Amino acid sequence: DGGITQSPKYLFRKEGQNVTLSCEQNLNHDAMYWYRQDPGQGLRLIYYSQIVNDFQKGDIAEGYSVSREKKESFPLTVTSAQKNPTAFYLCASSGEGSGELFFGEGSRLTVL
Amino acid sequence: GEDVEQSLFLSVREGDSSVINCTYTDSSSTYLYWYKQEPGAGLQLLTYIFSNMDMKQDQRLTVLLNKKDKHLSLRIADTQTGDSAIYFCAESKNQGGKLIFGQGTELSVKP
């Protein structure tokens, strides 16, 4: 089945550690996105990529990094520079048409 | 500027209609969307409307767009307990572009 797979679903991290969240899609979509969700704040865009080997900062990119070496994959690294990393992270992709975003099931990161 | 606003909570009784409202500020938005999020899961697209439309109906869902007032609403007829979730509206300026989301409205359906 086509879709977006995020892993891990739950992740715990000690302060000062970098962690990488995986996002893979088999929808043949060009564009991929990372959003952060906090209670009562909706979704905020971290990074997005509209084509392989290219990506742009979103509204809250500080403390995060991404790569887009393959069309199918858009991993997000939460670095130790991110001051408040505990959140629910959502990856999405979009193709041609109405601009609809297809979302993964999310990864919940907790910093201990 | 870009800003999308929604009320945070709505509570209805099973069988009633639910109306979730959204306001946006960017008059150049071309597509407006409604997404549903169940607990601990990603978002699923419910429906979307192109900015040159006033209304779109899809089974129990009715979307109304008032472009003059920059107001979008989602009506769910005969609301069921399975409709309990968070509902997000979002706007986009172009196909395939990044979306701007509201804060989400948590719908609670009581039996």
Image: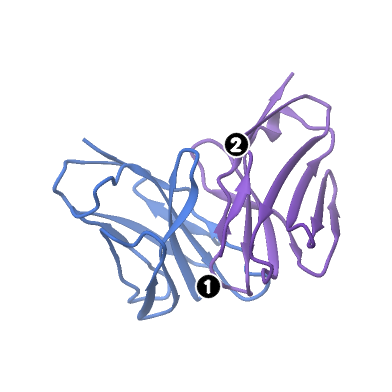
Which is more toward the observer, A59 or B1? B1
- What sort of colour scheme is used for the picture? by chain
> Residue under circle 2?
B8
Please state which amino acid type lies under the numbered disc 1.
His
The chain letter for the residue carrying disc 1 is A
Residue A29: image tag: 1
Q: Is residue B61 above or below residue A29?
A: above
Image quadrant where one finds the C terminus of chain B = top right
Q: Looking at numbered disc 2 in the image, what kind of residue is underneath it?
A: Leu
In the depicted view, which residue is nearer to us: B32 or B2?
Answer: B2
Mark yes or no: residue A1 visible: no
Q: Position of residue B86 (x, y in %)?
A: 60, 39
Query: In the image, A19: left or right of B84?
Result: left
Residue B45: percent from left, percent from top: 65, 54
Quarter occupied by residue B68: bottom right
Give the colour in which the image draws chain A: blue
Q: What colour denotes chain B?
A: purple
- Residue A105, x across and y down, in percent: 48, 48
What secondary structure is marked by label 1?
A: loop
Q: Secondary structure at mark 2?
A: loop
Residue B42 position in % (x across, y down): 52, 48
